Image (cartoon, helix red, strand yellow):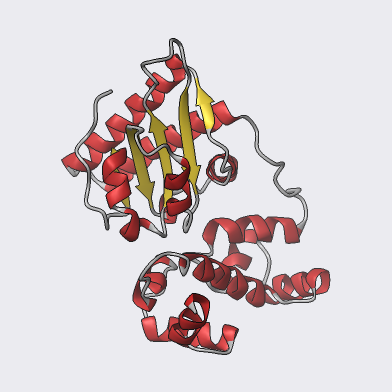
Amino acid sequence: MRTPEPTAPRAPLAVGPLADLRRQRPASIAHYALVLLEADRRAAASPQLLYCGVPGQLAALLARVPAAAQGLGACFAPGLLPEEPGAGHAALALLANPAPLAVAAAPAAEIAFLLTSLGQQVAAGQGLELARAYLHALLLRCASLRGPGPAPAAPGGLLARFRQLLEQRFRTCKSVASYAHELCVTPNHLSERIRQETGRPAGEHIRQRVMQEARQLLAGPDVQLKQVAYELGFEDTAHFGKLFKRCHGMSFSDFRTKQLG
């Protein structure tokens, strides 16, 4: 299996051999991950295994991979996921499933080729948009092997559409007005309808989803406030720190100390 040159660990997209992915673990806690193991040469026609992981779970993913295994892997920031509802749902369903997927020789060769091509695009500095297109092709090919995931929420209801959009955009979109614009309703109508159906206004759902992700990111070792804020789309670290304290009743550092204690 050809292996592309590993990219910088703090880049939004890093592709390379499994050994490099292991070394990048501290810098990739907020990234999705995908690992294709090489076939076991001792067993004829043995399937290859594909492992996937969501942000905060890279350590757990690598713990499931045999220590002596070799293969190719990719880590990428959440903002690189497909935004189209169908493609985005298929990618999320693939990445959220912790069970390794057995892949036959032919599709495994396709995935290895896509990983290698993706790594070459990144290494050549051809631009993130082109690399994103390769990544989406890779994710959709892998998702087609996994099969359909859980059925998405019914598209007709405003609450269901809001929840689906929130899952796709919470890292980059924090205002009720932005979601209302996407859903073709007024901010007041969206907030009131969500409050009627859930007991909480739309803004509270947005804040809670962001804080849920923040707590998940805190599972990584030596995580700093600035890093979590950046991964969640906050340019102002102080603003994120105040929001975290308002939602949790304690500062980021106190929360982390309590969690580790």
**205 left or right of 12 in image:** right
Residue at the image position 35 percent from the left and 29 percent from the top = 114
Q: Please provide percent x and percent y for residue 33.
A: 42, 46
Does 146 sit left or right of 253 as displayed?
Answer: right
Residue 119 shown left or right of residue 63 in the figure: left
- Vertical placement of residue 48 versus 198, above or below: above
Horizontal and vertical percent position of residue 74: 35, 42
Foreground pick, 205 / 259: 259
Residue 87, quarter of picture: top right
In this view, 184 is above or below 36: below
**Residue at 29% over, 47% down:** 128
Q: Is residue 25 above or below residue 171?
A: above
Could you tell me residue 6's position as x and y percent?
22, 42
What is the quadrant of residue 184 in the picture? bottom right
Whether residue 176 is visible, yes or no, is no
Number of numbered discs on residues: 0
Residue reaching furthest top?
Answer: 44
Vertical relation: 188 (above or below) 32: below
Direction right: furthest residue: 196
**Figure quadrant of the N terminus:** top left
Q: Residue at x 37, y 81 (%)?
A: 237
- Please say whether residue 167 is visible from this viewpoint: yes
Q: Percent position (x, y) of residue 99?
A: 57, 38
Between 61 and 249, the one nearer to me in the picture: 61
The residue nearer to you, when weighing 51 against 203, is 51
Q: Residue furthest left?
A: 124
Look at 42% across and 46% down and name the residue there.
62
